[in-house]
Image (cartoon, helix red, strand yellow):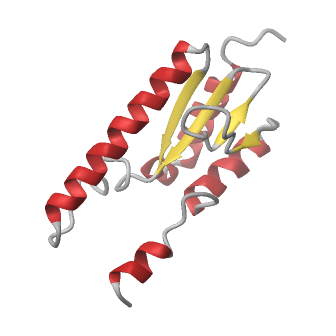
Amino acid sequence: MDRSQIMRSVRSTDTQPELAVRRMVYGLGYRYRLHRKDLPGSPDLAFIGRRKVIFVHGCFWHGHTCRRGARRPKTNADYWREKIARNVARDASNESKLTVSGWDVLTVWECELAKPEELCAKLRAFLAAGVSP
């Protein structure tokens, strides 16, 4: 399999980590909208009435500091370093735009799925915060 074929198979929506987070949020009783293009960065989950959004990021693609995110390909290293740096900068810009517009933003990292109980508690706390019953 050549590199371009591999890259074509990389999904940007409906990834396994995203689907896992969606199942957790749905199980907590929250309903959401997917990939709202009218919001900066097209957040993976948007809770319009609560003005909250969740991004689900792959550790490698978005430059997380975990072990998986710290991996760097040996071939074409300069390209990958620049690409990931652009992704990190774009993520920061989108989060800033959302925050300035009055949205609360949560980023869920792929590595956090290894501890589902902790992630579920984090999601529950984020979604319940600042909302009066």
Find residue 12 and report its image quarter: bottom right
**Residue 85 coordinates in the image, percent (x, y):** 27, 44
- Residue 116 lies, with reference to residue 128, above or below; the image says below
Find residue 25 and report its image quarter: top right
Q: Nearer the viewer, residue 50 or 90?
A: 90
Instruction: Name the image quarter holding the C terminus.
Output: top right
Q: In the image, is 131 to the left or to the right of 120?
A: right
**Residue 49 coordinates in the image, percent (x, y):** 79, 22
Residue at (40%, 37%) from the top-left corner? 90
Instruction: Name the image quarter holding the N terminus.
Output: bottom left
**Residue 105 coordinates in the image, percent (x, y):** 55, 26
Residue at (63%, 48%) from the top-left corner? 21
Q: Nearer the viewer, residue 57 or 120?
A: 57
Q: In the image, is 93 to the left or to the right of 106?
A: left
- View extreme (front): residue: 38
Residue at (20%, 53%) from the top-left corner? 81
**Residue 114 coordinates in the image, percent (x, y):** 48, 54
- Residue 21 at least partly seen: yes
